[in-house]
Image: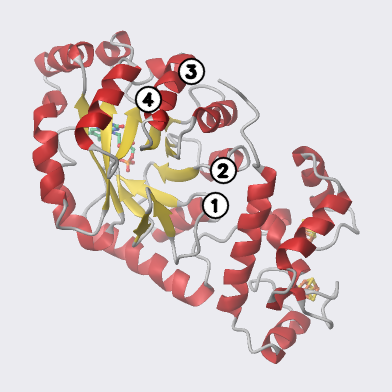
């Protein structure tokens, strides 16, 4: 699901650090990204208004003093050319009112960039132009745009505000329609919302809103985010702090966004750390929720670890490291086993990440909710 690199790949490109610049109309442009390029892996420039109705909405908003909505669509090609010199995956944050407007942009700018649909803006002129938050309340229209872009073979991100509609249902519909990325402004809802969405779809999740310190970033990663993004606090000092922190975590632990254990509030990825289903604990109700019976769970973990070093572990509770806990839970038996296999804890975590990816692929085998 995520590729076997240190962080993740988006649009077929390795992302050098899981930190993104979120769009701020009139601010997040190529020059702004180049100044911050050393500490970010992705940038969403814009937003830009795509068609006559959203351009007219921009004009109305500029008249009321919101000059940031002056982002000129004709500038995009120049901006993209400037961004070619940096090793950052580039996205365009776009406001449009029809699938055709987005498809036409994709013909113009090709498949090297991510197309981010702005379903986030809650300014009335944009809503009246059938863009921004209008799309959250009219999910069929949003899915039609996603489907049209997906059919063009481009990478699709959807920028949303959490809590406007049922986020879990929305996530499943966007997945079914062919979205690749869900970029979520969490507003006041925090990391529990990220866990809910992680447990609803296999999309790449970018968590956004007030991520300005390592502890806030790690809360997002340990509950299911693949990346975090910053807008208002995206100064070089904060980006550098977060970037250094997550690189160190990755080097030391082997899995930068490892989940908490299930019984400590972890998302579904944490099934990689769960024991055999032998006691009353959150495992059994969780298996019920995802429609997996005990035997399927046992067979799946055995099958996914078969022939790997973590299938070994004769002196552990369940005879294999496949059932063992996170290294943050102290355990002499597991650690002795790892030592005898000459495995570092970080190598153990890399294998658990692979196991978790396999489990998630099985859980989210197909998008059953159609738009
Ligand atoms: C001045 C400004 C302009 C923004 N413009 C856009 C935009 O064009 N498109 C969009 O999806 N989000 C836009 N946003 C929202 C941000 O991308 C982000 O979701 C929000 O500010 C919360 O993240 P933060 O706490 O890191 O700032 C804008 C935010 C600000 C402050
Ligand atoms: S199986 Fe183990 S790790 Fe998983 S929820 Fe139960 S006690 Fe926690
Ligand atoms: S051996 Fe240790 S790490 Fe493995 S399941 Fe038992 S308590 Fe957990």
Give SS at disc 1: loop
Counting from the top left corner in percent of width and height, residue 18 is at 38, 57
Residue situated in front as seen by the camera: 162 or 37: 37
Q: Is residue 72 above or below residue 348?
A: above
Residue 336 occupies which quadrant of the picture? Answer: bottom right
Alpha-carbon distance for marks 2 and 3?
Answer: 19 Å
Q: Residue at x 71, y 62 (%)?
A: 304
Query: Neighbour class for label 1 at 10 Å: few (<14), some, many (≥20)?
Result: some
Q: Which residue is mark 2?
A: 202
Query: Neighbour class for label 2 at 10 Å: few (<14), some, many (≥20)?
Result: many
Alpha-carbon distance for marks 4 and 1?
Answer: 25 Å
Q: Residue furthest top?
A: 128
Give SS at disc 2: loop
Query: Neighbour class for label 3 at 10 Å: few (<14), some, many (≥20)?
Result: some
Counting from the top left corner in percent of width and height, residue 157 is at 39, 36
Callout 2–callout 3 Cβ contact below 8 Å = no
Compared across the picture, whether 200 is left or right of 30 comes to: right
Counting from the top left corner in percent of width and height, residue 117 is at 34, 29
Q: Which residue is mark 1?
A: 1
Compared across the picture, whether 9 is left or right of 171 comes to: left
Give SS at disc 3: helix
Mark 4 C-beta to ligand 1 under 8 Å = no
Q: Which residue is mark 3?
A: 139
Callout 2–callout 1 Cβ contact below 8 Å = yes
Q: Is residue 128 above or below residue 188?
A: above
**Between disc 4 and disc 1, whose residue precedes?**
1
**Between disc 1 and disc 3, whose residue precedes?**
1
Q: Is residue 66 above or below residue 280?
A: above
Q: Which residue is mark 4?
A: 119
Total residue callouts = 4
Query: Neighbour class for label 4 at 10 Å: few (<14), some, many (≥20)?
Result: many
């Amino acid at each position: 699901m995520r590729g076997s690199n240190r962080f993740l790949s988006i649009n077929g490109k390795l992302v050098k650090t899981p930190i993104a610049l979120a769009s701020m109309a009139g601010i997040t442009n190529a020059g702004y990204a180049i100044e911050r390029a050393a500490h970010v892996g992705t940038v969403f420039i814009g937003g830009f208004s795509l068609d006559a109705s959203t351009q007219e909405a921009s004009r109305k908003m500029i008249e009321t003093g919101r000059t940031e909505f002056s982002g000129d669509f004709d500038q995009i090609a120049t901006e993209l050319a400037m961004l070619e010199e940096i090793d950052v995956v580039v996205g365009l944050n776009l406001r449009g009112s029809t699938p055709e407007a987005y498809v036409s942009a994709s013909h113009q700018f090709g498949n090297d960039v991510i197309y981010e649909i702005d379903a986030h803006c809650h300014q009335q002129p944009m809503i009246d132009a059938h863009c921004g938050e209008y799309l959250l309340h009219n999910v069929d229209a949003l899915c039609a745009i996603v489907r049209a872009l997906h059919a063009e073979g481009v990478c699709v991100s959807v920028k949303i505000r959490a809590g406007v509609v049922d986020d879990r249902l929305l996530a499943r519909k966007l997945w079914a329609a062919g979205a690749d990325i869900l970029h979520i402004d969490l507003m006041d809802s925090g990391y529990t919302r990220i866990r809910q969405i992680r447990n609803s779809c296999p999309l790449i999740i970018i968590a956004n809103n007030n991520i300005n310190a390592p502890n806030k970033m790690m809360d997002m990663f340990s509950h299911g985010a693949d990346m975090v993004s910053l807008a208002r606090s995206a100064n070089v000092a904060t980006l550098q702090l977060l970037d250094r922190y997550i690189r160190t975590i990755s080097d030391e632990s082997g899995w930068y966004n490892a989940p908490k254990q299930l019984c400590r509030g972890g998302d579904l990825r944490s099934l990689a750390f769960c024991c055999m289903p032998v006691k009353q604990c959150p495992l059994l109700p969780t298996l019920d929720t995802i429609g997996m019976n005990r035997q399927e769970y046992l067979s799946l973990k055995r099958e996914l670890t078969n022939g790997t070093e973590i299938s070994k572990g004769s002196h552990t509770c369940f005879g294999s490291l496949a059932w063992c806990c996170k290294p943050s839970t102290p355990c002499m038996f597991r650690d002795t086993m790892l030592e005898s296999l000459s495995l570092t804890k970080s190598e153990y975590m890399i294998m658990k990440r692979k196991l978790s990816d396999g489990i998630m692929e099985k859980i989210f085998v197909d998008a059953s909710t159609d738009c």
